[in-house]
Image: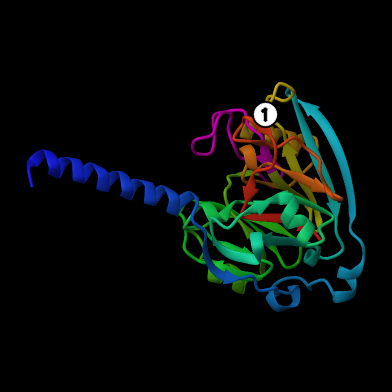
Amino acid sequence: MSRRLFGAAYSVALALFTAYVLLDTFVIPRRYAPVTEGTVAAVAPASTSAAPSVTDSLAQPAVTLTTYRVDDTDIYVADLQLTSVDQLRAALADDTFGRNVTATTSTIAAAHGATVAVNGDFYGARTSGYVLRNGVLYRDRAASADQEDLVIWADGSASVIREGDVTAAELAAQGAWQVLGFGPGLVEDGAVTVAAGDEVDKAMASNPRTAIGVIAPLHYVFVVADGRTSASAGLSLAQLAQFMADQLGVQTAFNLDGGGSSTLWSDGAVVNQPTTNGRKVSERAVSDIVYVA
C-alpha cells in the first residue's frame, strides 16, 4: 500500500473511531441495571436520629410555588415541607440505571406520580461519580477527590461531601438516602461557598440553573432560574447562591445540572422556560429527576 493510500485509510479509520466514541459517549444507550426501590427504614443506621415512620410518610407534603425576579432573571422556587424524607425521591429515565438513557423531566415525573419535580444531576452523561438514589447504591466510582456531592440523610438532614473523603459504600452504611452529584456546593451552614468567578466546566457566567436547598431537616426548596432568553439573562453560581442564602434562608444549597436541562415541573405542567441547547424553549431529555412523591 502506498504511503498516500495508507494515510487516507488511516484518516478514514480515525474519523470512524472518533464518530463511534462520540456516539458512545452522547447517544448510544447503555442499560446497566433496572431501578430497585429502597426504603428509609432500610438505610437508617442506629447512629442517625430516628427515621420517619411509615404513617408519617402518608401525610401530605406542603408545597408552595413562588416566582422571583432577580438580576434580570425569572427564578422559580418550590418550597417543600415534608413529613418524611421518603417523600423526597429520585427517579431515573425508563426506570433504568445506565448511560444515555434519557427522557424529559415531565415524562419521568408523570410516570412516577410526582407532585413537583426538577431535573437531577444528569449522572448518565458521566462514567464516574457516586450515584445513590432512594437508598440504593448504583455507582461507587469516585469522579475525583475534589468532586462535591449533596447527601440527603435518612433523618432528613443534608450535607455537602467530597468524594475523596468518603466512599459511596460508607455513605450508604451511614444512612444516605440520596447522593446527588454535579455541583458545586453553593451554601454550607448558611454561608455562601462559591466566589464570583466560580463556574462549572464549559459553562458561561450566566446560565439557566437548577439547585436544591435545605432550610431545615425535611424543609427543602427546589430552585430553577431561567436564562439564555430575551426575558431572562440567567444567573452565575455566586448569584444563585446569594439568592438562596439571603432570600430563602437555606443552610445548605447544591447546584444540579443546569443550562438546557433546567426544568421545574408541577401538577402536570412545566413551570419555567427551559431552553434546549439555548436555541428554543423546550425540554431537554435528562437521565434523572428529583421529585416530591
Residue at image location 75% in from the left, 50% down from the top: 106
Q: Where does residue 41 sit, x and y in percent of width and height?
A: 75, 77
User: Where is residue 179 shown, x and y percent of the image?
Assistant: 62, 60
Q: Quadrant of residue 241?
A: top right
Where in the figure is residue 279, as x and y percent of width and height?
A: 62, 29
Residue visible at 58% across and 65% down in the picture = 97
154 in relation to 208, above or below: below
| Left or right side of 88 for 7 | left
Residue positioned most to the left: 2
Which residue is at 77% across, 62% downward? 112
**How many neighbours does mark 1 have within 10 angstroms: few (below 14), some (14-19), or many (20 or more)?**
many
Residue 138 part of the magenta-drawn span: no
User: Residue 192 lies in magenta, yes or no?
Assistant: yes
Could one spot residue 45 in this view of the protein?
A: no
Amino acid at pointer 1: Gly
- Report x, y in % for residue 177: 68, 66
Q: Magenta segment, which residues?
A: 187-210
Q: Quadrant of the C terminus?
A: bottom right
Q: Is residue 13 left or right of residue 56?
A: left
Q: Which residue is mark 1?
A: 234
Q: Is residue 28 left or right of residue 10?
A: right
Q: Is residue 48 above or below residue 121?
A: below
